[in-house]
Amino acid sequence: MRVPEEHLKEVMRMGRFAETLFWMHVVIFIGWFGLFWIPLSIWPGRVVFHFWYITFAVASELLTGLLLMPVMLKYRIVCPLTTWMQHVRGYKISDPKNFDHSFVRELFQRFRVKIPYGFVGALIFISWGGVIIQYLVKR
């Protein structure tokens, strides 16, 4: 049985789209942690921007988790970009790849670095806590 050429083109296009979503994640990830390294002397408003940047990202994950709760039958923190990326790759919304911080895991795996299960969640909340402290102290 031969696969229609249109189907193969669609699969290739979706693969490129999923890869584009992956690299959009990388930009957000670099901003999330990279902003810590920009001195206030260069960007005086960095702390306020960083606070709202991370707060918006975490709020969107909390809201996505709430919206997907009927599908997953449990509340989980879910990145909307990860859900979109995994959906394009053919995974169901209820698949653990949507709520198991699969983007960060995939990013580190591309560099052949294995990270422990709770590391990503802890990193998210520790960094958000650091930004909140900076916001309260330095704004």
Image: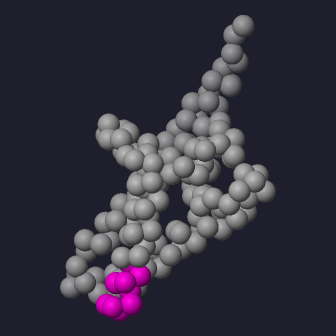
Q: Which image quadrant: the N terminus?
A: top right
Q: Is residue 128 left or right of residue 6?
A: left
Check if residue 109 falls in the magenta segment: no
In the image, 9 versus 123, the foreground residue is 123
Whether residue 5 appears in this view of the structure is yes
In the image, 129 versus 64, the foreground residue is 129
Q: Is residue 22 left or right of residue 65?
A: left
Q: What secondary structure is the magenta-colored segment mainly?
A: helix
In the image, 118 versus 132, the foreground residue is 118
Picture coordinates of residue 32 (x, y %)? 39, 66
Q: Which residue is found at the position 43% from the left and 73% from the top? A: 128
Q: Which residue is found at the position 64% from the left and 31% from the top? A: 10
Q: Which residue is found at the position 57% from the left and 44% from the top? A: 97
Q: Is residue 123 left or right of residue 12?
A: left
Q: Can you tell which quarter of the image residue 41 is in? A: bottom left
Magenta span:
131-139
In the image, 25 versus 103, the foreground residue is 103
Q: Which residue is found at the position 29% from the left and 87% from the top? A: 44
Picture coordinates of residue 29 (x, y %)? 40, 59
Picture coordinates of residue 84 (x, y %)? 62, 50
